Image (spheres, rainbow, N blue to C red):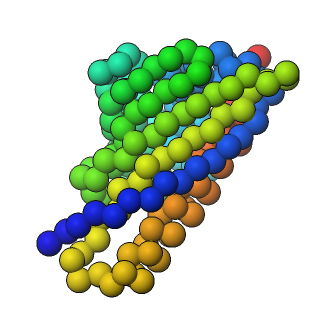
Amino acid sequence: MTRHAHVKAQVTHRFKASPERVFDAWLNPEFATRWLFTSPTSDPAGRRMEMDARVGGSYTIVDRRNGTDYIGDGEYEEIDRPHRIVFTFRMAQFSEAIDRVIIEIKALESGCELTLTQEITVPHEDSASPKQIQEMLAAYKGSTEKGWTKMFKALEKQLASHQ
């Protein structure tokens, strides 16, 4: 039987752009395809994003890497421009587990600070030991924080090049 454990990953990043520009980068499909859930191995021709950016609306992101399509989807739970976005996230090809992502943006004298918290659901077998579960949680947390950090650097470049 599969059980679930939970861990929170958190990343904070400062941007030189206004809170409104950073906020909008999450909800504009054309702009988001340039940085959101993308990687250096992404095939731009294989990227697709569908977004119904409203509370209760859904999104689907397709990112092709080395010939394989990776599909993420979810629903928007909160949208409060330019301060907060909350959405669910899953990659059904790997697990039916659903994570929750919370984006909080605060204005600074120059630019803004974004804090992302991802509430991660980690599936594991009944037979997993407490030590194995803790190791899995640490691995999920670490890789999630590393991934968001890379995406925020990509977002920073996109914001700078599309003033």
Residue shown at 28% from the left, 71% from the top: 124
Residue 37 falls left or right of residue 55: right
Could you tell me residue 146's position as x and y percent? Answer: 61, 57
- Residue 58: % across, % down: 32, 26
Against 121, residue 135 (above or below) is below
Instruction: Name above or below for residue 46 compared with residue 107.
Output: below
Specify the quadrant of the image occupied by residue 107: top right
**Residue most extreme to the front:** 130
**x then y, percent, for residue 116:** 57, 41
Is residue 157 visible in the rendered structure shown here? Answer: no
Q: Is residue 160 left or right of residue 78?
A: right
Q: Residue at x 34, y 64 (%)?
A: 5
Viewer-proximal residue among 113 and 146: 113
Does residue 34 sit above or below 11 in this rendering?
above
Q: Residue at x 29, y 81 (%)?
A: 128
**Residue 82 in sight in this render:** yes
Residue 1: name its quadrant.
bottom left
Quarter placement of the C terminus: top right
Q: Residue furthest right?
A: 109
Taking depth in this image into account, of 77 and 17 the one nearest to the observer is 77
